[in-house]
Image: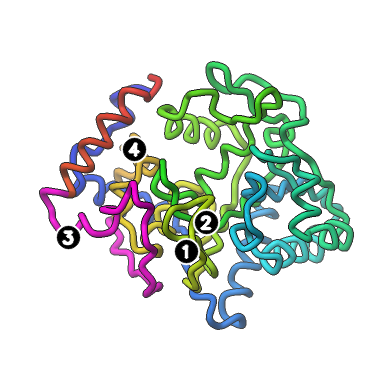
Amino acid sequence: MSNDEFIWAKNAEEYDSYISKLISLKQPKALSTLEDNKYLPLLQSNIINFIKYYKGNRILIKTSTSGKRPKNHEISDFLLEFVASTITKNIDNAEIILADGPVYSFYSTEVKRLGWTHIVDKYNLKCIDLNDTEKIKLYKTLEISEVFLKSDVVINLSKAKTHHRFGISCGYKSLLGVIVNKKNKTKLDGLHGYVPFILNKIVQIGPPIFSIVDGIDGIEGNGPLKGNVTKSNFICYGEDPFTTDVIAAIEMGFDPALIPLLIKPIDNDQINNQVELAYSRISEIDFIPSFSYRWLYKSYRNRNRRDLYYSRLLNSIIKYWDN
């Protein structure tokens, strides 16, 4: 990345300015799920328009399924079936793939355990474990699934969750599931510090992604594996997994500037002519953060403390960013 084209926000206030412009460019949305007759038609029309715009016939529905988690820690059956039904009824001759690359199990095992088999059968979905697919080199020792790369479009489904290492785990983080690793069932092979860079690279080389974050029942506390279910009643969606997660973090009651995965260099030319957008939060539920991020939604009330945390995160991320 050339320093002339990409810049890092120097402090939290500058980050806010860049991110607000990026949101105005990418236009992710958050909707209350308390009234089905309002949010479902909007979500449906956006999914259809996205697929038709990219002329998608090979459609990958990717779930965020690490394996062996409680069912209420996964995306809801309702959301999965809603997406599958929307595609089947509105996209002619579509090949619909249901897939992910679990860390702790096999995808076929998880589909059966989670009770999704009837959805697979009803909508004639092709169920694939991304860990068992052909692959190409992504970065260093990491390889990425060709099924993901060769899809026309991806509908990326994830749950709004806290995360003990990364602050949150939503649609952006869930893209690590397209990394293939069958040898020891670990995705990152010791490259945890590079995750912000790796995610950015996956989005750059991958197909168009429509990201949906299920915050109807989120996971708070010591997530993602040991968190507690919260009734938060929101859903976020957009054509960019990064900014969709920014909106999701705000709906969770968190400060995006203090979340490692949401700090990256900004394409200054891309946002140069964008106006700053004041985002209005719709959710009234503040998620309890993981203990390791207990300051996540409190520290932004103190400007100096907020800048200190941002500066620490920025320095830790820059040294792992591959230029």
77 left or right, relative to 317: right
Pointer 1: residues within 10 angstroms few (<14), some, or many (20+)? Answer: some
**Separation (CA) of disc 2 from disc 3:** 28 Å
Q: Residue furthest top?
A: 140
N-terminal of the pair, mark 4 or mark 3, is 4
Tell me whether circle 1 and circle 2 mark residues in contact (CB < 8 Å): yes
Quarter occupied by residue 265: top left
Circle 3 is placed at which residue position?
Answer: 301
- Find residue 302 and report its horizontal and vertical position in percent: 13, 56
Q: Residue furthest left?
A: 304
| Residue nearest the observer in this picture, 56 or 16 | 16
Which element is circle 4 on?
strand
Q: Is residue 284 located in the magenta-colored stretch of the structure? A: yes
Which element is circle 2 on?
strand
**Separation (CA) of disc 1 from disc 3:** 25 Å
**Separation (CA) of disc 1 from disc 2:** 6 Å
Which mark, residue 266? 4
N-terminal of the pair, mark 2 or mark 3, is 2
Circle 1 is placed at which residue position?
Answer: 29
What secondary structure is the magenta-colored segment mainly?
loop
In front of the other: label 1 or label 3?
A: 3
- Find residue 166 and report its horizontal and vertical position in percent: 41, 43
Pointer 4: residues within 10 angstroms few (<14), some, or many (20+)? Answer: some
Identity, as a three-letter code, of the amino acid under mark 3: Arg
Circle 2 is placed at which residue position?
Answer: 238
Tell me whether circle 2 and circle 4 mark residues in contact (CB < 8 Å): no
Tell me whether circle 4 and circle 1 mark residues in contact (CB < 8 Å): no
